[in-house]
Image: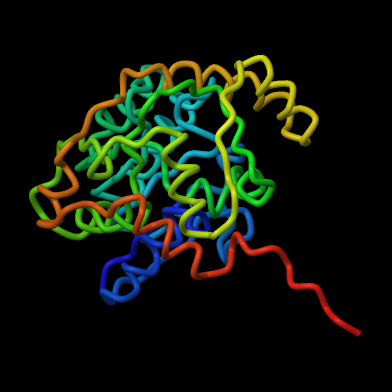
Amino acid sequence: MTTTLVLGGTGKTGSRVAARLRDLGADVRIGSRAGAVPFDWDDDTSWDPALRGADSVYICYYPDVSFPGAAERVGAFARAAVASGARRLVLLSGRGEPDAVPAEDAVRGSGAEWTVLRCAWFAQNFSEHFLVQPVLDGVIALPAGDVAEPFVDTEDVADVAVAALTRDGHAGRTYELTGPRLVTFADVAGELTRATGRDIRYLPITAEQYADAAGRAGVPAEEIEPLSELFARVLDGHNAYLSDDVERVLGRRPRDFVDYARAAAATGVWSPDPVSVA
């Protein structure tokens, strides 16, 4: 039985990767500050205990592999993983993010069997992350203009990650993971309106307006500037094309945003809290 360390194992992709690996009979170790064996990117003394006995690692760097300092941390961790005996590393990366390439290269140069997953925007950002409240408020305000994005479902990302962790033929590959069609944020608002039965609209704003709103919402100051820069780099139209890598790896088409929206709506995540009647 193999042991896989899943970093970010309680997050959007990591939790799904961990669940799938357990279904396959693998021994899964969750890498997080609250894990049974705690892992902290900012405390390298926590790395070796988390890596001990792991044959493979799913690497999800927080807050983002394009942020300052990420390449150095990811590189040091990848070398530690190989020294500990891990032979296969799968890195979650961003699609069309030049600042993420140094972290990718650090994993490529680690000496392990590596696979890089360059992902489009997650559909689940609207139901499991920072865009939940805007959907509930009925206004999705982002500095995205009318740019189209091939939103990818994290279920597909997890399936590809598990394939790369458990099957041969994926070492040395860089996959671009997208959904099956291009969707604008106005399209997203329309799909969510139909799925929820509520009026949800998209409001294009400037990067400066987004940064100001993020600060008022309590986003840490050290994250606001990198996030704003990331949006400016990613949501400029250069990612508005599709990849068939999900289908080539999994042998099926990727999940469409409309299917995601219907399934997420059915969970009640976008339903206002019911009013209790005395």
Residue 129 coordinates in the image, percent (x, y): 57, 48
Residue 201 lies left or right of residue 120; in this view the side is: right
Q: How is the image coloured?
A: rainbow
Residue nearer the viewer, 149 or 1: 149
Quadrant containing the C terminus in the rendered view: bottom right
Residue 72 coordinates in the image, percent (x, y): 46, 24
Residue 101 coordinates in the image, percent (x, y): 34, 22
Q: Give me the residue at 37% from left, 44% from top.
A: 81
Residue nearer the viewer, 250 or 199: 199
Residue 262 lies left or right of residue 208; in this view the side is: left
Residue 110 lies left or right of residue 168; in this view the side is: right
**In this rendering, is residue 196 above or below 173?**
below
Q: Give me the residue at 74% from left, 21% from top.
A: 212
Most distant residue in the bottom direction:
278
Where residue 217 sits, quadrant-wise, is top right
Quadrant containing the N terminus in the rendered view: bottom left
Residue 125 lies left or right of residue 21; in this view the side is: right
Q: Give me the residue at 23% from left, 41% from top.
A: 115
